Image (cartoon, rainbow, N blue to C red):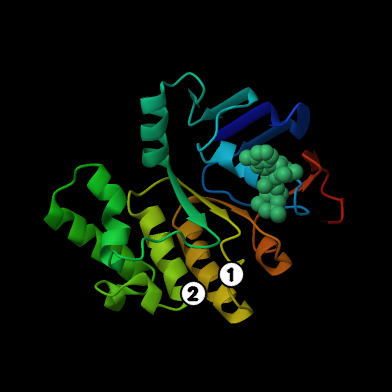
Amino acid sequence: MLELKQINKFFMHGKEKQHVLKDISITINDGEFVAIMGHSGSGKSTLLNIIGLLDRDFSGSYLLNGRDTRALSKKQYTRFRNENVGWVFQNFKLIDNMTVADNVGLPLQYQGKPHKEIRRIVEDVLAQVGILDKADTYPKLLSGGQQQRVAIARAIVTNPNIVIADEPTGALDSATTIEIMDVFRRLNAAGTTLIIVTHDASVGEQAERLIKILDGQVMGADYEI
Ligand SMILES: Nc1ncnc2c1ncn2[C@@H]1O[C@H](COP(=O)(O)OP(=O)(O)OP(=O)(O)O)[C@@H](O)[C@H]1O
Ligand SMILES: [Mg+2]
């Protein structure tokens, strides 16, 4: 379970202080599929970075699975992220000079898993996202949808309980968006908590819950984006 309480976040622009997240309190239960929507600049990515343990420079409290994320040492915080959260981005963020299998296996390599075991797990997740035949090719030779499947495989290879995605279909056409959302939906059906930021209403409507953000604040369900 994720419990954010009274989160406030500021950015400094020279001497000017920008209040980007304003008193955000959100609870997300295990296994939920939540979409976050709002205008450009409303603070979605800033909020997602906090939720996905990439940023803990904020005020308020954030408990993840009962742990106070701000009480962890830097090392514990990184480890906690690697164990609990898989990240997917709009522009895939794959490493071009590494094969698909090596990209996907990277988080396991960081964990120090033996090579043979890594290969077995990688083949397993590549099959899960439907691109096992691409294991030994390079990301640049794949379509956008295939590259996003690689990124999803990399996000789930450590078997995290939460997958976080910032505009995962933002660079994809509508047919490919449907395919990628099928992958995400299957993941969620298998029990993974899924939190997606999107501008695409067709993506947002697939979520169980929609969180609408306006100017750094959570709006009520009746607010029209
Ligand atoms: N690293 C940063 N330094 C300073 N200001 C930032 C930083 N990151 C974001 N901001 C500011 O915070 C506000 C919210 O940005 P954020 O990226 O969270 O918006 P967003 O809702 O994700 O927008 P988009 O839909 O365009 O991705 C913006 O005004 C942005 O300029
Ligand atoms: Mg953003």
Q: Give the mark nearest the N terminus, 2 or 1.
A: 2
Counting other residues with Cα less than 10 Å from the Cα at mark 1, is it few (<14), some (14-19), or many (20 or more)?
A: some
| Residue sitting at the far bottom | 175
Assign ligand 1 to one image quadrant. Answer: top right
Q: Which residue is mark 2?
A: 144
Separation (CA) of disc 2 from disc 1 = 7 Å
Q: Is residue 120 visible?
A: yes
**Residue at coordinates 28% horizontally, 78% vertically from top-left?**
133
Rendered image quadrant of residue 90: bottom right
Query: Residue 203: x percent and y percent?
Result: 65, 65
From this view, report whether residue 142 is shown above or below residue 108.
below
Query: Residue 49: x percent and y percent?
Result: 57, 41
From this view, report whether residue 131 is shown above or below residue 120.
below
Query: Residue 211: x percent and y percent?
Result: 72, 48
| Residue sitting at the far top | 71
Q: Is residue 66 left or right of residue 153?
A: right
Which sits in the foreground, 178 or 54?
A: 54
Q: Amino acid at mark 1?
A: Ala
Rendered image quadrant of residue 120: bottom left
Q: Is residue 216 left or right of residue 168?
A: right
| Disc 2 to disc 1: CB gap under 8 Å | yes
**Residue at coordinates 64% horizontally, 58% vertically from top-left?**
207
Q: Amino acid at mark 2?
A: Gly
**Residue at coordinates 44% horizontally, 21% vertically from top-left?**
72
Q: Secondary structure at mark 1?
A: loop
Counting other residues with Cα less than 10 Å from the Cα at mark 2, is it few (<14), some (14-19), or many (20 or more)?
A: some
Q: Secondary structure at mark 2?
A: helix
Q: Which residue is mark 1?
A: 171
In the rendered image, which quarter contains the C terminus?
A: bottom right
**Residue at coordinates 63% horizontally, 78% vertically from top-left?**
174
Q: Is residue 36 visible?
A: no
Which sits in the foreground, 118 or 58?
A: 58
